[in-house]
Image: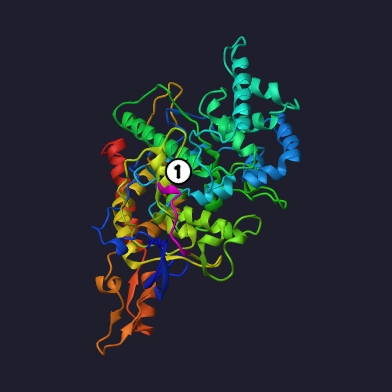
Amino acid sequence: MEEVEIIVEKNEQIIVSSTNSNPISRTAYFLNPTHASTQPPIPKTPSSLSCAIEFETCPLKVSYNGWKYPTEKWKSWVHRMEAIHRSVWKRAGIYDAVMSSVCCIKRDDGLMMGLAQKWCPETNTFVFPWAEATITLEDVMILGGFFVLGSPIFPCSLESNELEEIEKKLNEARNELGRGSSHKASTAGWMNMFMFSDNEIEHEAFLSYWLATFVFYDSERILNAQVFPIAIRLAKGEIVALAPPVLASIYRDLGLLKATLLSVSEIETTENCSDVLTLTLWSPFHLVQLWAWERFPAFRKNPNFVKNGEPRSALWHNVKIKKVRNVKLALDSAANTFWWRPYTTRSDSSYLPNIYKEKAEWKDLETNPELFQMALCLRISELVGLSCVEQYLPHRVARQFGLDQDIPSEIVRPNEFPELAWINYIRPFGHNAKLYVPSKFSEPGVTPQYFEWWNKQAVLGGRDMLKDAISSVVRKKRSSRGRSKWVSLNCHIRDSYEVFKPAIEEMMRSCEIKSVDNKVFGGLEEKTNGETEIPTCSTHDSTNRVEEEKETSTKTFEIPGLELEDRISVLEKAIAKLKAERFGSNCC
């Protein structure tokens, strides 16, 4: 009998809501596998390995080669081809993706560097003091317009002699370009050769250019022939799963950027480096910024009004950068402002209204391809790219899908070839498999066990985070010779603390948690008379909490938690230590 894969598991649990601090007992829905479902040893919390580098003084220059700004020439070609091949693009599932290529997303370099410092390559997630979050297949599908379901992108033989003949003609055209003075098949030369040519293979040539420039850009201005079979299949209306390789390349580049930042941070701690280091990233990294703008209100300006039929990325076309003075501090203190489910709050998405309804429901996977795509977004897998294979762990960020979060089970990464990884990615869920689809209005929460588990990360990392945040406000810019200079600032640290005091206090509230009664976290508290009492949670200050406890006998525990005096004491000690380290023991 065929085994049915259980994607979402239902359980009665005490849940702490993201928007309501009072834990309640209710039916919870968890994304498998959780620690409770597999019962391995409790996993370690992920680490983002602090590398407190300021963007202004960082000696690393990052070239985001995959971040493309559309030219007027390209826009003209897109609009002409769209008028002819719109129906084919929609059938192949690339209409939004192609039309997104005419959107201009202005880059916020400080935000990109700030997010990269939070990246954990071991889990492919951003590790903030308040939770994990990441770019998922759902994000790539909605923001980039790429399909999660379809044929694989790795090389395979074309099905007919006609398609093989088209590939031959494309290769001949590429070879002809290579015989020019530059001896290279440049993307610019390719566009000049085929744009508005009415050539019989202009559509395939157009899609080849799009794939090589906006999707799988991996070589400076050179057209990669590896995209030809993909372009040919798309031109015939075949659906190709482009979302997995796109996300794999983004994960790869985030890991590379994080590793480079750690190396630069290590260099700067041992000696001042006047040399400028360079790093080139090739993935469509603008999707990282779109993801951040959708979820962090502090970093974005108002989005555009999107007309019916326009891709989601049109929301952010030509939107100006919002300057944030301290990116790290803003990210660390975003616990209460982070949007877990931004795509359910607007009605301009052509995809999600077909999935998330007003009421939650269980649906049959076999009868709905859109649901099957959603199920692939929820399942642990390996993402196969053109030159990499990356692990995908959505169970660590269940709240991004409207599901509750329990301690995620650790996943041993399989050592597989791309072909085997793809077979595992696309494997069936089983006969009569069903998917729980939460309401668009659902407010996911976390279990007390998860809260206590994550507390270890917050407590261990909170003070280093605070030290880095304060340190970053008092450091001067690098001199003209490229070396960091420190000056004696008798009052600047105190002034900086006063400016950032509200944000730092909020950060401490969101990331430091007191230990709690194990009996409360372990389940419902039992009264002496045998009745079961549901614990409540309070985030008020100590005075209000005392008054509330006088009015109710309900067991309480505190969620973010250092008292105000304790937080100020920690700040003062951190500031004093910084002053002593940087300016000498005589600094006043």
Q: Residue furthest bottom?
A: 529
The one of 36 and 400 positioned closer to us in this rendering: 36
Instruction: Indicate the quadrant containing the N terminus: top left, top right, bottom left or bottom right.
Output: bottom left
Q: Residue at x 34, y 62 (%)?
A: 450
The colour mode here is rainbow
Q: Is residue 132 above or below residue 222?
A: below
Q: Which residues are magenta?
A: 424-434
Q: Is residue 111 visible?
A: no
Please tell me whether mark 1 sits on a helix, a strand or a loop.
Answer: helix
The outermost residue toward the top is: 181
Q: Which residue is mark 1?
A: 115
Q: Indicate the quadrant where residue 521 lies.
A: bottom left
In which quadrant will I find the C terminus?
Answer: top left
Give how far across and how far down residue 24 sits, in percent.
40, 75
Residue 531 pos. (x, y %) = 30, 87
Badge 1: residue crowd in 10 Å (few <14, some 14–19, many ≥20)? many
Q: Is residue 10 above or below residue 69?
A: below
Task: Describe residue 439's horizontal placement relative to residue 542 as left or right.
Answer: right
